Image (spheres, helix red, strand yellow):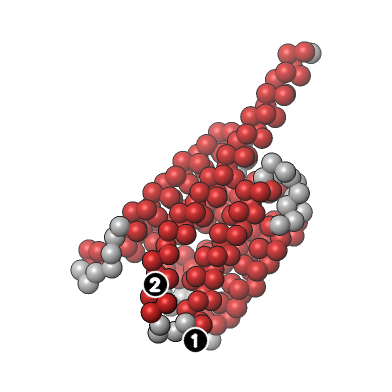
Amino acid sequence: MKVNLKTNLVVIILTIIYGLLIVTSLFIKDGSESGTYTLLFTLDIGLKTLFALLLFYLTRVLIAFNEKKSIVIAFIMYTFIQTIYLIDDIMPGLVFIGGYIFLLEMLTFLTVTYLFIQIFRIQNPHIGLSFRLFGVSIFILFLKEMIVPMIFRNSSFLENTNNLQFLDIIKSLTILFILKRVAEFLKNRDDQSLQVSLKL
Protein backbone atom coordinates (compact mmCIF):
# COMPACT_ATOMS: atom_id res chain seq x y z
CA MET A 1 0.00 0.00 0.00
CA LYS A 2 1.62 3.23 -1.19
CA VAL A 3 1.27 6.44 0.77
CA ASN A 4 -0.05 8.96 -1.75
CA LEU A 5 -2.93 11.43 -2.01
CA LYS A 6 -5.30 8.93 -3.60
CA THR A 7 -4.65 6.20 -1.03
CA ASN A 8 -4.78 8.75 1.78
CA LEU A 9 -8.22 9.91 0.60
CA VAL A 10 -9.50 6.33 0.62
CA VAL A 11 -8.22 5.86 4.18
CA ILE A 12 -9.88 9.15 5.22
CA ILE A 13 -13.19 7.77 3.94
CA LEU A 14 -12.60 4.53 5.87
CA THR A 15 -11.86 6.55 9.00
CA ILE A 16 -15.10 8.50 8.61
CA ILE A 17 -16.98 5.20 8.24
CA TYR A 18 -15.14 3.97 11.36
CA GLY A 19 -16.30 7.04 13.28
CA LEU A 20 -19.88 6.65 12.08
CA LEU A 21 -19.91 3.02 13.22
CA ILE A 22 -18.71 4.13 16.65
CA VAL A 23 -21.52 6.69 16.87
CA THR A 24 -24.02 4.06 15.72
CA SER A 25 -22.85 1.64 18.41
CA LEU A 26 -23.37 4.35 21.05
CA PHE A 27 -27.06 4.53 20.21
CA ILE A 28 -27.61 0.79 20.37
CA LYS A 29 -28.29 -0.58 23.83
CA ASP A 30 -27.58 -4.13 24.93
CA GLY A 31 -30.71 -6.22 24.92
CA SER A 32 -31.80 -9.78 25.29
CA GLU A 33 -33.18 -9.85 21.75
CA SER A 34 -31.04 -11.86 19.37
CA GLY A 35 -31.38 -9.17 16.70
CA THR A 36 -29.76 -6.57 18.93
CA TYR A 37 -26.94 -8.93 19.88
CA THR A 38 -26.29 -9.79 16.23
CA LEU A 39 -26.17 -6.11 15.29
CA LEU A 40 -23.77 -5.29 18.14
CA PHE A 41 -21.58 -8.25 17.22
CA THR A 42 -21.48 -7.18 13.56
CA LEU A 43 -20.62 -3.61 14.53
CA ASP A 44 -17.85 -4.82 16.83
CA ILE A 45 -16.31 -6.97 14.08
CA GLY A 46 -16.58 -4.09 11.62
CA LEU A 47 -14.95 -1.64 14.04
CA LYS A 48 -12.05 -3.94 14.88
CA THR A 49 -11.46 -4.80 11.21
CA LEU A 50 -11.41 -1.15 10.17
CA PHE A 51 -9.15 -0.24 13.08
CA ALA A 52 -6.66 -2.95 12.10
CA LEU A 53 -6.66 -1.62 8.52
CA LEU A 54 -6.14 1.94 9.74
CA LEU A 55 -3.25 0.83 11.93
CA PHE A 56 -1.67 -0.90 8.94
CA TYR A 57 -1.85 2.33 6.94
CA LEU A 58 -0.47 4.40 9.82
CA THR A 59 2.46 2.00 9.94
CA ARG A 60 3.02 2.57 6.23
CA VAL A 61 2.94 6.32 6.87
CA LEU A 62 5.70 6.00 9.46
CA ILE A 63 7.79 3.98 7.02
CA ALA A 64 7.19 6.52 4.24
CA PHE A 65 8.26 9.35 6.55
CA ASN A 66 11.47 7.43 7.40
CA GLU A 67 10.76 7.17 11.12
CA LYS A 68 12.92 4.98 13.33
CA LYS A 69 12.53 1.21 13.13
CA SER A 70 11.65 1.00 16.83
CA ILE A 71 8.59 3.20 16.22
CA VAL A 72 7.51 1.13 13.22
CA ILE A 73 8.00 -2.10 15.21
CA ALA A 74 5.82 -0.70 18.01
CA PHE A 75 2.98 -0.10 15.53
CA ILE A 76 3.42 -3.54 13.97
CA MET A 77 3.22 -5.14 17.43
CA TYR A 78 0.09 -3.16 18.31
CA THR A 79 -1.55 -4.04 14.98
CA PHE A 80 -0.75 -7.72 15.62
CA ILE A 81 -2.37 -7.57 19.08
CA GLN A 82 -5.51 -5.94 17.67
CA THR A 83 -5.67 -8.62 14.97
CA ILE A 84 -5.53 -11.34 17.64
CA TYR A 85 -8.52 -9.78 19.43
CA LEU A 86 -10.37 -9.61 16.11
CA ILE A 87 -9.70 -13.29 15.40
CA ASP A 88 -10.93 -14.21 18.87
CA ASP A 89 -14.17 -12.33 18.26
CA ILE A 90 -14.73 -14.18 14.99
CA MET A 91 -13.64 -17.57 16.35
CA PRO A 92 -14.17 -17.53 20.15
CA GLY A 93 -11.92 -19.81 22.15
CA LEU A 94 -9.23 -20.05 19.50
CA VAL A 95 -6.95 -17.55 21.25
CA PHE A 96 -8.23 -17.15 24.81
CA ILE A 97 -7.57 -20.63 26.16
CA GLY A 98 -6.78 -21.10 29.83
CA GLY A 99 -3.67 -19.28 30.99
CA TYR A 100 -3.14 -17.70 27.58
CA ILE A 101 -5.68 -15.02 28.53
CA PHE A 102 -3.37 -13.59 31.18
CA LEU A 103 -0.35 -13.81 28.88
CA LEU A 104 -2.16 -11.93 26.12
CA GLU A 105 -3.30 -9.25 28.57
CA MET A 106 0.29 -8.82 29.78
CA LEU A 107 1.51 -8.67 26.18
CA THR A 108 -1.13 -6.03 25.45
CA PHE A 109 0.00 -3.97 28.44
CA LEU A 110 3.66 -4.14 27.38
CA THR A 111 2.82 -3.35 23.75
CA VAL A 112 0.63 -0.34 24.55
CA THR A 113 3.25 1.02 26.95
CA TYR A 114 6.00 0.51 24.37
CA LEU A 115 3.86 2.17 21.69
CA PHE A 116 3.09 5.10 23.97
CA ILE A 117 6.81 5.67 24.62
CA GLN A 118 7.90 5.25 21.01
CA ILE A 119 5.20 7.50 19.59
CA PHE A 120 6.76 10.46 21.39
CA ARG A 121 10.03 9.80 19.55
CA ILE A 122 8.54 10.62 16.14
CA GLN A 123 10.83 13.20 14.53
CA ASN A 124 8.87 14.53 11.55
CA PRO A 125 7.13 17.80 12.54
CA HIS A 126 4.35 17.28 10.00
CA ILE A 127 2.97 14.22 11.79
CA GLY A 128 4.54 14.36 15.25
CA LEU A 129 1.74 16.15 17.15
CA SER A 130 -1.08 14.22 15.49
CA PHE A 131 0.54 10.87 16.23
CA ARG A 132 1.16 11.89 19.85
CA LEU A 133 -2.51 12.76 20.29
CA PHE A 134 -3.36 9.37 18.83
CA GLY A 135 -0.98 7.71 21.31
CA VAL A 136 -2.58 9.51 24.25
CA SER A 137 -6.07 8.43 23.13
CA ILE A 138 -4.89 4.81 22.77
CA PHE A 139 -3.35 4.87 26.25
CA ILE A 140 -6.47 6.36 27.85
CA LEU A 141 -8.66 3.75 26.16
CA PHE A 142 -6.32 1.03 27.36
CA LEU A 143 -6.65 2.26 30.95
CA LYS A 144 -10.44 2.27 30.57
CA GLU A 145 -10.69 -1.18 29.03
CA MET A 146 -7.93 -3.12 30.79
CA ILE A 147 -6.65 -1.44 33.95
CA VAL A 148 -9.88 -0.02 35.44
CA PRO A 149 -11.73 -3.39 35.42
CA MET A 150 -8.78 -5.00 37.23
CA ILE A 151 -8.84 -2.37 40.01
CA PHE A 152 -12.54 -1.62 40.36
CA ARG A 153 -14.15 -5.04 40.19
CA ASN A 154 -17.93 -5.21 40.79
CA SER A 155 -18.25 -1.49 41.52
CA SER A 156 -20.54 1.29 40.35
CA PHE A 157 -17.46 3.10 39.01
CA LEU A 158 -16.77 0.18 36.69
CA GLU A 159 -20.34 0.32 35.39
CA ASN A 160 -19.94 4.03 34.71
CA THR A 161 -16.84 3.43 32.59
CA ASN A 162 -19.05 1.64 30.07
CA ASN A 163 -20.46 5.08 29.29
CA LEU A 164 -17.02 6.30 28.20
CA GLN A 165 -17.28 4.76 24.76
CA PHE A 166 -17.25 8.29 23.34
CA LEU A 167 -13.47 8.12 23.85
CA ASP A 168 -13.38 5.90 20.76
CA ILE A 169 -14.70 8.88 18.80
CA ILE A 170 -11.71 10.92 19.99
CA LYS A 171 -9.45 8.13 18.73
CA SER A 172 -11.03 8.29 15.27
CA LEU A 173 -10.67 12.09 15.27
CA THR A 174 -6.96 11.83 16.04
CA ILE A 175 -6.56 9.43 13.10
CA LEU A 176 -8.33 11.95 10.86
CA PHE A 177 -5.93 14.61 12.13
CA ILE A 178 -2.97 12.39 11.17
CA LEU A 179 -4.40 11.79 7.70
CA LYS A 180 -5.05 15.52 7.24
CA ARG A 181 -1.43 16.29 8.09
CA VAL A 182 -0.23 13.55 5.72
CA ALA A 183 -2.44 14.95 2.92
CA GLU A 184 -1.06 18.45 3.47
CA PHE A 185 2.52 17.17 3.33
CA LEU A 186 1.91 15.14 0.17
CA LYS A 187 0.14 18.03 -1.55
CA ASN A 188 2.96 20.45 -0.72
CA ARG A 189 5.52 17.93 -1.93
CA ASP A 190 3.65 17.38 -5.21
CA ASP A 191 3.25 21.16 -5.71
CA GLN A 192 6.98 21.69 -5.18
CA SER A 193 7.80 18.88 -7.63
CA LEU A 194 5.47 20.44 -10.20
CA GLN A 195 7.09 23.86 -9.78
CA VAL A 196 10.54 22.36 -10.28
CA SER A 197 9.43 20.51 -13.44
CA LEU A 198 7.87 23.70 -14.85
CA LYS A 199 11.11 25.61 -14.28
CA LEU A 200 13.01 22.90 -16.11
Q: Residues within 10 Å of mark 2 (few under 14, many from 20)?
A: few
Identify the mark at residue 98; answer none if there is no mark.
1
Q: Residue furthest right?
A: 200
Q: Residues within 10 Å of mark 1 (few under 14, many from 20)?
A: few
The residue under label 2 is which amino acid type?
Answer: Asn
Location of residue 7 in the rendering, given as x and y in whole percent from the top left corner: 56, 38
Q: Badges 2 and 1: C-beta atoms under 8 Å apart?
A: no
Residue 38 visible to the viewer: no
Q: Residue at x 45, y 54 (%)?
A: 169
Identify the mark at residue 65; answer none if there is no mark.
none
Location of residue 197 in the rendering, given as x and y in whole percent from the top left corner: 74, 17
Q: Residue furthest left?
A: 33
Residue 177 visible to the viewer: yes
Q: Residue furthest bottom?
A: 99
The residue identified by callout 2 is: 160
For residue 29, side relative to residue 130 (left or right)? left
Mark 2 or mark 1: name the one nearer the start of the chain.
Answer: 1
Q: Quadrant of residue 92?
A: bottom left
For residue 11, side relative to residue 200 (left or right)? left
Q: Secondary structure at mark 2?
A: helix
Location of residue 148 in the rendering, given as x and y in whole percent from the top left corner: 50, 76
Q: Secondary structure at mark 1?
A: loop
